[in-house]
Amino acid sequence: MKYIVGIDEVGRGPIAGPVAVCAFLCHPDFFDKISPEDKLPKLKDSKKLSKIQRGKWFKYLKSKKDLGECDYCVSYVSADNIDKFGISKCIKKALNSSLAKVAQNPEEVSVYLDGGLKAGEEFMHQETIIKGDELHPVISCASIVAKVSRDKVMSKFSEEYPGYGFEKHSGYGTSAHYEAIKNHGVTPIHRKSFLN
């Protein structure tokens, strides 16, 4: 197969902010070319890497994208649309959008998806892997790019809506976040359907 694509989503569970899905495309030998001199942490699921480790990987992957050695796209669906259409439909929409941007020729790619994700039927070569973000490096890359990208979006929201701590909890339902809602009310980026 000419290319491999990894797909992962971030932000299924938060009570605020968008859901994000990344499609990460590279040649099958991309990971063989990573050198010890790159001084990268072990590649694994983004949740199991520290913020600094994720940042190192993101910087490396972005530099490789700039050189044309890989490609990725992150698509977002807003809290408003999550309330309207439900999280599953929104993840599917973001997934299709990201995949269409990086893989114009479905017959040329093998797609590896995390968890319960599925690509469109035109992608004949696809495999859904439970804990794929831990087990397959191309899904790990998608996981890292999605997480770092979404965290940046949430940090920007923290400037727009100070006092909620979005830059710390990224919209997840921590006790501090619920306390902030009690004190300041619900913002337009909160998922009302997740707060009921």
Image (cartoon, rainbow, N blue to C red):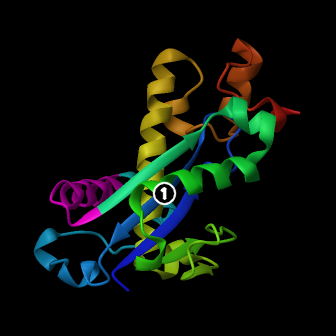
Count of numbered circles on the image = 1
Query: Tag 1, which secondary structure?
Result: helix
Is residue 44 visible in the rendered image? The answer is no
Q: In the rendered image of this protein, does residue 32 appear above or below residue 9?
A: below
The magenta-colored residue range is: 52-70
> 93 or 61: which is nearer to us?
93
Mark 1: few/some/many CA within 10 Å (<14, 14-19, 20+): some
Residue 56 within the segment the image draws in magenta: yes
Name the kind of residue labelled 1 in the image.
Ala
Is residue 186 visible in the rendered image? The answer is yes
Q: Position of residue 164 (x, y in %)?
A: 60, 23
As drawn, the residue found furthest toward the top would be 184
Q: In the rendered image of this protein, does residue 29 appear above or below residue 148?
A: below
Q: Where the N terminus falls, by quadrant? A: bottom left
Residue 193 within the segment the image draws in magenta: no
Q: Position of residue 116 (x, y in %)?
A: 70, 70
Q: Determine the residue positioned at 59% across, 71% down.
A: 122
Q: Determine the residue positioned at 36% across, 73% down.
A: 43
> 92 or 101: which is nearer to us?
101
Q: Position of residue 112 (x, y in %)?
A: 52, 76
Q: Where the C terminus falls, by quadrant? A: top right
Query: Which residue is identified by label 1?
Result: 100
Q: Position of residue 192 (x, y in %)?
A: 80, 29
Q: Determine the residue positioned at 29% across, 70% down.
A: 41
Q: Tell me the chief SS of the magenta region.
A: helix
**In the image: residue 23, left or right of residue 2:** right
As drawn, the residue found furthest toward the right would be 196
**In the image: residue 9, left or right of residue 12:** left
Q: Determine the residue positioned at 51% across, 46% down.
A: 75
**Which corner quadrant of the image does residue 101 belong to?**
bottom left
